[in-house]
Each structure stands twice: as C-alpha cells, then as structure tokens.
Image: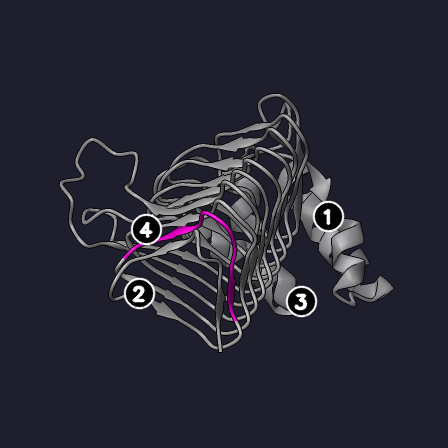
Amino acid sequence: MSMIDPTARIADGAVIGAGTEIGPYCIIGPNVVIGADCKLIAHVTVSGHTTIGAGCVISPFAALGGAPQDLSYRGEPTRLEIGEACTIREGVTMNIGTVKGGGLTRVGDRGFFMNNSHVGHDCIVGNNVIFATSATLGGHCEIGDFVYIGGLSAVHQFTRVGPQVMIGGVCGVRGDIIPFGLANGQYAVLEGLNIIGMKRRQFTKQRLATVRGFYQKLFHGPGIFAERLASVQPLASEDPAIAEILAFIDGGKHRALCLPANTN
C-alpha cells in the first residue's frame, strides 16, 4: 500500500508502486510510473512520460520529466527513465528526450545526484554514478558506469565520458574522456588514470602497471597522437581495460578527445 499525503496532487493515470511514500505538495503527472518503495519527501514534481524504478529517494524541489530545453521540441511524448535505488537530492532536474535525439533520457541504477545537478535531454547515464552539487550535462551526453563528476562541472552536449572516470570540480568538459580517465582543470584536460577508482574495481598491481604503460605510450610517447594510436593497437590483447579504451576512442563521433595538456 502506498502512502500519499493529502496535499499531494496525483493525476489520473499515474501509477504508484506498493510501499511508496508521496510527501506533502508533490505533483505527479498522468503519464508517470513510480516503482515500489520509493520516497518523494515533499515538493517533488514528476511530469512527462517518466518512469522511476523501485527504491528511489527524491528530495524537495526536484523536477523530473520536464520538457527538454531544446528549441525543436513540440510537445512530443518522449520519455525519461530512471533506474532503481537512486538518490536524487534537492533541486535536481532531469528532462525527457527529443525526437531527433532518440526520444529517451535514461538514468541507470544506484545513482547519487547531489543538489541542483542536471541531466539534459537525450542523455544516457550509467549505473553507480555520482554527480556532485550543480554538476550539469548538456543534451545527448553519454556517461558510463561509476563516473564521478565534481561540483559545478559542466559537460558539453554530445560528449562521451567513459566508465570509471573521475572529473574534478569546476571543470568545463568539452572532449570525450577515455574510460578510467582522470580529468581536471577549468577547461578539462586529461591528467592521468583514475587509479583509486581502478583499485576499487579490484585491479591488481600487475593490471595497473600494464594499463599505465599503455597510457604513457599513447599520450606521452614519441610522434603525433595519430601515430601513437596506431602503434598501440596491438596492446589491446594485453588487458581488457586497454581494449575498452581503444574501442572508446574508435567510437568517437561528435567531440574531439580530451587529451593531456601539451599533447601533440
């Protein structure tokens, strides 16, 4: 049985899962599905064609499923899907997709979105991410699993951020960041590998040494970047992380790669 405060407004057609609590002054639209055992504390707005997975906790003044901030939007029934066990703090915004972007904004499981962070239209966000205060995604971004985005950092539209990346605070991210990368700076540059994150994912000392050696050859070896990239292709067989990084680089479409400072 769900528990709904009498001041909340639940539109006809909304589906509220068993055990979910809807607190004071929440507004739930007619095309919303909220899973079991969620808690909307107070003053939460969920609109659009939005689905929220089980076990999410959503704090006051979060606004989920609002129209995309895109001039081409004409009211189409595009969607927002949020996974299970997410923590969505005060003032977080997540927008539905656009037709031209595929019509779907998707957020994975177990994400922690701190206050005033933003997920733009048509973004695909992985599992176990952490968005610090006011971390912001432009439209069409792709964010991998276990990514950490520091406070007040902004990711340019169409940018890809690979799994297990750490982005520092107050960064403008304009280029794709390789898996396991560590990026920092006012205009983000690649500063190395996210070694702490890799250790948390149970990388052994040998694996860390192998991937570090590959990183040095790719980004700090002789010649220009295109030559170095060609020369390290045979290293893909040495470790799955190397293969993942090379596949990520090969899959770039819209944005240049985020590189270390002073890299040719």
Which numbered disc flags the more N-terminal residue, 2 or 1?
2
Look at the image and give the residue range highlighted in magenta.
20-29
In the rendered image, which residue does mark 2 sit on? 14
> Which residue is under mark 1?
194
Q: Please give the residue where the numbered disc 3 appears in the rendered image.
A: 239
| Mark 3 or 2, nearer chain start | 2
Q: Where, by quadrant of the figure, is residue 187 drawn?
A: top right
In this view of the protein, which residue sits in the foreground, 32 or 244? 32
Residue depth check, mark 3 versus mark 2: number of the one nearer the observer = 2
The residue tagged 4 is: 47
Q: CA distance from mark 4 to mark 1?
A: 37 Å
Q: How many marks overall?
A: 4
Say whether residue 229 is visible.
yes
Rounded to the nearest angstrom, the CA distance separating label 4 from label 3 is 44 Å
What's the image's color scheme?
Answer: one colour
Q: Amino acid at mark 1?
A: Asn
The amino acid pointed to by label 4 is: Ser
Residue for point 44% across, 32% down: 156
Instruction: Label 4: state its secondary structure.
Output: loop
